[in-house]
Amino acid sequence: MTNIIKVNQLTKIFGNTKALDHCDLEVKKGEIFGYLGPSGAGKTTTIKLLTGQLHSDGGEITVLGKNPFSPEIRHQIGIMSDMSGLYEKMTVYENLDIFADIYGITDKKRKIEKALASVELLDAGKKKVEKLSRGMKQRLVFARTIIHSPKLLFLDEPTANLDPATADEIRALIRQLNDNGTTVFLTTHNMEEADELCHRIALLNKGKIVECGSPEELKLKYSRKKVVITSTDGTKEIPLDKSDIIRELEGTADLLMIHSEEPSLRDVFLTLTKEAYAS
Ligand SMILES: Nc1ncnc2c1ncn2[C@@H]1O[C@H](COP(=O)(O)OP(=O)(O)OP(=O)(O)O)[C@@H](O)[C@H]1O
Ligand SMILES: [Mg+2]
């Protein structure tokens, strides 16, 4: 099975709001799939639909070859949304112990220690959660999310409100898990993060998927296709076209600099969301 997630014409309506409007998407085995969009675009709603926390108002969803409500799926997916749900008065170890029980994990001690080690919290096992820093709590939530070795991870803004160093740690963890075969569905508002981590991304705006592809494909697609040539005569912008460039260079005095202007993922995002707002 190459498609871990397949969504056809997914629609979700809340009162007068079409949170998702006939969305199609596919997530392939082994990829980190970025799901980007402005606040209110429908990202969290999609995750809830894909993980059987909400019913849709139309369309089909297949996750790991099954309907998201089938009980077999629960043990194969991990969901990380926010820090809520940690038991503050309990220790780090006890928090994971509860989850290990929920998942019916048999070799609990080994699994808990492995999860704690992977987020570098092994030494903090006896600490009460209320004594942890924000970054440590986020790492604990991450450990909780992966304790049952899920094949597919849903991460809803895993690095939001974290200091840069902790955010880097979380990104390294995501990459490490993905290197070991875990497929990741990730939402983020951080464009550099999406560019750095994701194999493919979908851009969602007002409940509609407006673009999908690898970060490179999207940047190329929305490139202004211009070249800026700076010579002793001054600076000129010309089309990114072989014969135009050659002609221009032949007539140029002393060349100082040539560069093409590639958009960042952030530029692509802003262009697309603006276009969608205008239409
Ligand atoms: N339970 C709900 N009841 C009513 N409306 C809802 C509910 N959940 C979400 N919505 C609406 O659906 C739309 C999409 O919300 P969603 O939370 O999926 O956005 P998001 O892309 O995750 O945004 P953010 O980036 O801020 O997390 C919004 O207009 C939101 O107000
Ligand atoms: Mg959200």
Image (tube, rainbow, N blue to C red):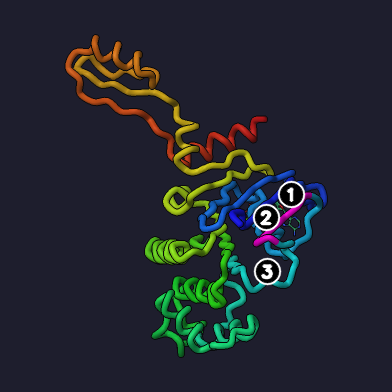
Q: Mark on residue 73?
A: 3
Up the image or down, 217 lies above or below 90; here it is: above
At x 71% / y 59%, what residue is drawn? 49
Tag in front: 3 or 2: 3
Which secondary structure, mark 2? helix
Residues at marks 1 and 2 touching, judged by CB atoms closer than 8 Å: yes
Figure check: 257 above or below 125: above
Left or right: residue 230 compared with residue 201:
left
**Residue 112 in the image: above or below residue 56:** below
The amino acid type of the residue labelled 3 equals: Ile
Q: Residues within 10 Å of mark 2 (few under 14, many from 20)?
A: many
Q: Main secondary structure of the magenta part?
A: strand
Give the number of the mark in front: 1 or 3.
3
Q: Which region is colored magenta?
A: 59-65
Mark 3 residue crowding within 10 angstroms, few (<14) / some (14–19) / many (20+): many
Residue 22 at x, y percent in the picture: 74, 44
Do residues under tags 1 and 3 come within 8 Å of each other at their CB atoms? no
Give the residue pinned by disc 1.
Answer: 10
Under circle 1, the secondary element is: strand
Q: Residue at x 67, y 30 (%)?
A: 279
The quadrant the N terminus occupies is bottom right
Q: CA distance from mark 3 to mark 2?
A: 16 Å
Amino acid type at mark 1: Leu
Circle 2 residue: 46
Mark 2 close to ligand 1, CB under 8 Å:
yes
For the residue marked with disc 2, what is the amino acid? Thr
In space, the residues marked 1 and 2 are separated at their CA atoms by 9 Å
